[in-house]
Image (spheres, rainbow, N blue to C red):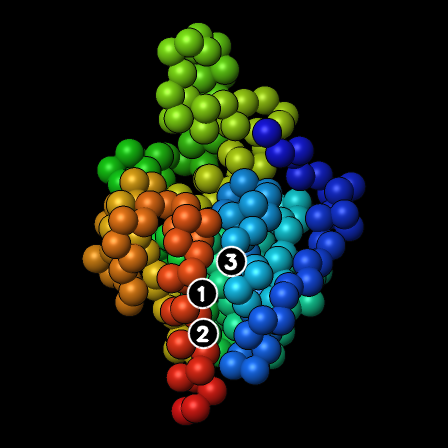
Amino acid sequence: MPQPLTERSESELSSRSGCAHRYAKTMTRKLILLPGMTPSRRIFQKLVPQLADCEVIDWIAPGRAKSISDYAHKLVDQVGIDSSSDLVGVSFGGMVAQEVAKYCGSRLCFVVSSISSSAELRPTQRFLASLPQRGDLAVLSAIGAVAHAWPRTGSTMSTVRARKFRGVHGNWFRWATSAALRWRSSPDGRAELIRIHGNRDSTFPEGDRYADHVISGAGHMLALTHSHELATIIHQRQAEADNR
């Protein structure tokens, strides 16, 4: 399990990642990559070598941020994201990317394996979102405790994921999950949102209905399992924007 995010660890987590320049001749704008909720760069390990100029942003501690909008504002100020870059956000990172785009005036925002509206949440997710914030945090904490006590021999992937909500180490996951459930997007008309989704995504199964690009056979880990298809879409859409 990744180390919990703390204010003390922010300087370490804001370290930047250089990317290969295989496509330097065809891409003119830098790409800012925002990962999923798990503080790990693994989701981009196959995509990064296929992009020319990119930077993977590590999550910072939320501090006093209560919403994804608050968090995005803090991220822009602390990391220094500006309008010279296009954005790629995966899952939770896709929600953050949409808010970052509003603050920094990005040209393109690639929303991968994510949502743009609470209407795309599953029924269980919408139920948690209907609870008072302290209520959903308490429920998530209880889910984590039950999952931790569950016999390892009977564990499923859902059980493993639920264990992330437990105790002090689950602070980030509980905060991020609660913020994601309560997020309400409001398009500002500046950044062009480009939705990319797999037709086998079990986390946000409704997402392919709203996607601009649907990748057949891809699940929620699309950025890792179908990195070539994703890179091709990014190259094409950036080139189109450059020529407009």
As drawn, the residue found furthest toward the left would be: 209
For mark 2, what is the residue?
235
- Mark 3 = which residue? 47
Report helix, strand or loop for mark 1: helix
Query: Quick one: label 1, few (<14), some, or many (20+) residues within 10 Å?
Result: some
The label shown at residue 118 is none
Residue 231 - label:
1
Determine which quarter of the picture holds residue 83: bottom right
Q: Residue furthest bottom?
A: 244
Which quarter of the figure is the C terminus placed in?
bottom left
Left/right of residue 93 with respect to residue 41 in the rendered view: left
Between 197 and 52, the one nearer to me in the picture: 52
Q: Position of residue 144 (x, y in %)?
A: 48, 21
Label 3 close to label 1 by CB (< 8 Å)? yes
> Residue at 49% across / 23% down in the picture?
163
Asked whether residue 202 is in view, the answer is yes
Q: Amino acid at mark 1?
A: Ala
Query: Which residue is drawn at the image coordinates 41% and 36% (left, top)?
Result: 132
Q: CA distance from mark 1 to mark 2?
A: 6 Å
